[in-house]
Each structure stands twice: as structure tokens, then as C-alpha cells.
Amino acid sequence: MSRKYFEEEVIQQTLDYNYAQHSDADKFNIAYGIDKNFLFGCGVSIASVLLANPEKALAFHVFTDFFDSEDQQRFEALAKQYATQIVVYLIDCERLKSLPSTKNWTYATYFRFIIADYFSDKTD
């Protein structure tokens, strides 16, 4: 039996930019846990993966605590351009900010636990 620790409490909003032409069963999921400082780098990484794997059915999941209207436009354009799916999960990270962090390892490091929890009963 799976217990949820994060989904109900932490994921505030989901934005699904789905322009994929493949079925959900065929896709390979790739997840990012980032703060606003790496949103641009995340977009570059997604584009790079898509360029290197044009024949693959891929879906990208971005867990972040910041995503403004410019970011929305950019990520939607990216999903549309490459006929892929990019799902953005807006995270309430106030509780995570109380956990230990350093200059190099921010509270966004803990997003990977949210990612694992979120996908634990959704994928193999």
C-alpha cells in the first residue's frame, strides 16, 4: 500500500503542455527538481535531450517553486516545437526551506523526494 507524504500538501498547481503524438504507455519520463535559478538551464537540457533523441517518446516533468508567465510561454513553445509533453508542478516549498541546505545545495535538492513520492505509484 502506497502512502502519500507530499502530493496533497506540496504540489499547488500542475501545468501540462502536451503536444506529444505518442501514447502515455510508450513514453519515457524524465524529471527535474529545480528552483528559479535553473529554469533556463532546464529548458536548454530538455531541448538538448529532444535534439539527441528525435525518435524517442519522451515526457518531461519539472518540479519547481517559481514559474512566471514568460516561463510558461517558453516551455509551452518548447513542447510545441518538439511535439513533446512538458508538465510543470508548482511546489509550495516553505516546509522544505526549514531543512538543512548550503549555498551549493539549496532547498530544491529536496524536490527529488517529492518526485519519487509523486511517481511511486504512477510508473514502473
Image (cartoon, grey):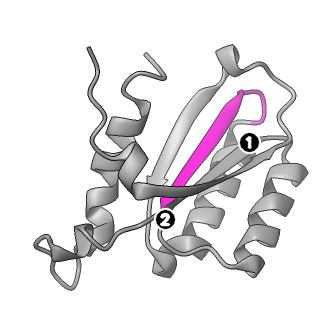
Residue at 77 percent across and 27 percent down: it is 55
- The residue tagged 1 is 85
Residue at 72 percent across and 27 percent down: it is 57
Residue at 26 percent across and 75 percent down: it is 106
Q: Is residue 107 left or right of residue 123?
A: left
x and y percentages locating residue 17 in the rendered image: 78, 49
Q: Quick check: marks 1 and 2 in contact, CB under 8 Å?
A: no
Front label number (1 vs 2): 2
Residue at 48 percent across and 81 percent down: it is 37
Q: Earlier in the sequence, mark 1 or mark 2?
A: 2
Mark 2 crowd level (few <14, some 14–19, many ≥20, 10 Å Cα):
many
Out of 85 and 99, give the one closest to the viewer: 99
Stretch in magenta: 54-64
Q: Is residue 16 left or right of residue 107?
A: right
Mark 1 crowd level (few <14, some 14–19, many ≥20, 10 Å Cα):
many
The total of numbered circles placed on residues is 2
Out of 64 and 98, give the one closest to the viewer: 98
Magenta stretch prevailing secondary structure: strand
Q: Which mark is residue 64?
A: 2
Structural distance between the alpha carbons of marks 1 and 2: 16 Å
Out of 108 and 6, give the one closest to the viewer: 6
